[in-house]
């Protein structure tokens, strides 16, 4: 009976992370490499979900995705149904909440790439996109990978925004944290502990993968 | 050699760029062969290269190379750096750490249209002596090897011009000599015009025919290297005590048996301390101008190994010292005090003897 919860949690977190990859790398690159007047504003907007209680994010999403909103109407036209209170709403909530953490980590990775390596590539005839894909991304790999994992972990543990915008529908929006919350309310302590055990197991495994990848893709010490 | 005449102008530029505490404003011509950009750190050398390469956009001015406008603030032309086809070796080599040495060398080569490829990576690997390091990871390269890989990588785009920013910076003497040797090889074998940025007058003397001297973002003077060295206007930018004579010499005997090596520079033979290099090979030799003693009479009973007869060709007397050019088969720069100049009554045409201790001659060893 936990399998459904676990699979749903994975589905929501993976989709949330995938949705975030391209914008997070793009925004991270922009914030590090471009020095424009809007950087200050962008940085603030990106960091905001980190500073706000997730329940507020959930409320904003609820309002902007409800069937009275333009996004809600668009969803009605495309999918023929509402987004709110679906697993996809949970994924969007997880994506928004984990986005700032991903961007932070990716920014660290991109900032570590020596500008002059990119300049050298430029002079060798590589256009901006080629430099980005052949120099910046491979050299920022560690930070990007760390960002993906951190984002995934954050999405996996997301609760506050999810419960508001997706609710707690068994088999549809009941992710691991939501399931634990539901069982705490109904006093099913045994199941609570079992689900907590599963959560800890996943957290440990993800962190081990994170550390292993960080070592594997270390350039500083030469070939490993 | 088809480097063209020394007076051939291959390009001109006039660039102005304002920074918060610094203003670069330089107008000069680029000659065929090797042009050195010389000046102290902070004089604007690297900024100038960045303007020429397109990494920095000047505020106003123009950059023309072989009759093509690369930048012109009036006509709003600004060719992107990737389309300028200027080989530019930035300071510190900057080998891409995530790809192999060979992939580094061919990174730019692959981006050049096949019909415009004039220099092949294989040729560069051979000229720059890199065949042994191809299988190594970039992090396993020595400083000198990394520098050679960076130069080969820049040359692989068949550049119209090769710009080198302090190519000997951070390398020890032996490796410095080998880089000088490789650069001279590139110049003769590949016919590439170069701009060499340097704060070392010995590097300029060893490689360049033409020099542009910068000070605080402005051009002090430009002209042929030999003439300029004697110019009074150089007094503020050259530290005479640092002056070195740098030559490429042929190894006659490395002295591994006797302890005394013998090298020749053209017709001149010099005894030097034993060193590691193959007999018959070329090696870089350095003699500090301040280490050479000058005498009007033929000295007797000296311990110094090298006593050479010569003629004073030029005398440069400036506020920070006196440098004379003496022809002993090759031209040597000799630094003396202004007092010695007066006491010895030296002038152009004086017959003199130069005394050079073997130990004051540095020979670049093979690594």
Image (cartoon, rainbow, N blue to C red):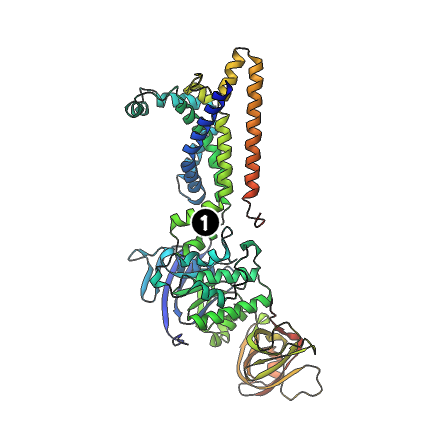
Residue A24: x %, y % from top left: 43, 36
Would you identify the image quadrant in which residue A87 lies?
A: top left
Query: The N terminus of chain B appears in which quarter of the rendering?
Result: bottom left
Residue A194: x %, y % from top left: 57, 19
User: Considering the numbered disc 1 on the image, is that residue within a helix, a strand or a loop?
Assistant: helix
As displayed, is residue B354 above or below residue A125? below
Residue under circle 1?
A135
| Residue B360 visible, this angle | yes
Q: Residue at x 40, y 71 (%)?
A: B31
Would you identify the image quadrant in which residue A212 lies?
A: top right
Residue B292: x %, y % from top left: 62, 78
**Along the horizontal axis of the image, is B258 left or right of B64?**
right
Pick the front one: B355 or B17: B355
Residue B295: x %, y % from top left: 63, 85
Q: Residue at x 51, y 37 (%)?
A: A146
As displayed, is residue B197 above or below residue B345? above
| Residue B94 visible, this angle | no
Label 1 crowd bin: few (<14), some (14–19), many (20+), radius 10 Å = many
Pick the front one: B223 or B203: B203
* Figure disc tally: 1
**Along the horizontal axis of the image, is B136 left or right of B36?**
right
């Amino acid at each position: 009976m936990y399998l459904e919860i676990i699979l749903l949690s994975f589905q929501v977190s993976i989709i949330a992370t995938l949705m975030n990859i391209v914008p997070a790398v793009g925004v991270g690159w922009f914030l590090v490499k471009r020095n424009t007047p809007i950087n200050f504003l962008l940085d603030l907007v990106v960091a905001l979900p980190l500073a706000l209680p997730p329940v507020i994010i959930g409320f904003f999403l609820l309002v902007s995705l409800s069937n009275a909103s333009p996004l809600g109407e668009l969803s009605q036209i495309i999918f023929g149904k509402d987004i709110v209170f679906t697993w996809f709403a949970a994924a969007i909530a997880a994506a928004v909440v984990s986005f700032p953490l991903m961007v932070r980590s990716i920014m660290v990775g991109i900032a570590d790439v020596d500008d002059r390596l990119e300049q050298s590539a430029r002079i060798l005839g590589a256009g901006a996109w080629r430099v980005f894909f052949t120099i910046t991304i491979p050299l920022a790999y560690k930070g990007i990978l760390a960002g993906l994992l951190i984002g995934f972990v954050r999405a996996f543990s997301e609760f506050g925004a999810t419960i508001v915008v997706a609710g707690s529908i068994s088999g549809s929006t009941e992710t691991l944290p939501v399931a634990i919350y539901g069982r705490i309310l109904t006093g099913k302590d045994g199941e609570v502990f079992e689900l907590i055990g599963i959560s800890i197991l996943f957290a440990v495994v993800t962190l081990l993968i994170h550390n292993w990848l960080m070592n594997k893709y270390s350039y500083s010490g030469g070939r490993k | 050699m088809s480097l063209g005449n020394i007076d051939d102008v291959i390009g001109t530029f006039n660039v102005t760029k304002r920074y918060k505490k610094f203003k670069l404003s330089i107008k000069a011509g680029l000659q065929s062969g090797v042009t050195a950009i010389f000046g102290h750190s902070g004089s604007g050398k690297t900024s100038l290269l960045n303007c020429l390469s397109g990494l920095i956009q000047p505020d106003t001015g123009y950059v023309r190379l072989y009759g093509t406008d690369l930048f012109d603030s009036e006509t709003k032309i600004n060719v992107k750096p990737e389309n300028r086809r200027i080989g530019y070796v930035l300071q510190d080599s900057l080998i891409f750490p995530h790809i192999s040495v060979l992939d580094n060398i061919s990174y730019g080569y692959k981006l050049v249209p096949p019909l415009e490829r004039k220099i092949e990576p294989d040729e560069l690997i051979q000229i720059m002596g890199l065949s042994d390091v191809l299988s190594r990871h970039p992090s396993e390269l020595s400083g000198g090897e990394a520098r050679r890989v960076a130069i080969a990588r820049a040359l692989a785009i068949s550049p119209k011009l090769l710009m080198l920013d302090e190519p000997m910076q951070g390398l020890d003497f032996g490796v410095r000599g080998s880089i000088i040797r490789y650069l001279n090889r590139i110049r003769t074998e590949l016919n590439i015009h170069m701009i060499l940025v340097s704060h070392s007058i010995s590097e300029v003397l060893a490689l360049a025919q033409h020099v542009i001297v910068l000070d605080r973002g402005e051009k002090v003077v430009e002209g042929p290297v030999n003439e300029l060295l004697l110019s009074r206007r150089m007094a503020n930018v050259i530290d005479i005590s640092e002056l070195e004579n740098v030559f490429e010499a042929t190894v006659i005997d490395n002295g591994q048996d006797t302890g005394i090596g013998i090298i020749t520079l053209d017709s001149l033979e010099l005894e030097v301390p034993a060193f590691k290099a193959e007999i018959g090979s070329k090696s870089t030799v350095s003699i500090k101008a301040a280490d050479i003693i000058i005498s009007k009479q033929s000295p007797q009973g000296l311990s110094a190994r090298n006593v050479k007869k010569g003629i004073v060709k030029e005398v440069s007397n400036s506020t920070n010292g006196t440098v004379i050019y003496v022809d002993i088969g090759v031209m040597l720069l000799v630094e003396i005090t202004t007092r010695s100049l007066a006491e010895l009554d030296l002038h152009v045409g004086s017959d003199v003897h130069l005394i050079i201790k073997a130990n004051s001659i540095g020979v670049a060893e093979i690594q």
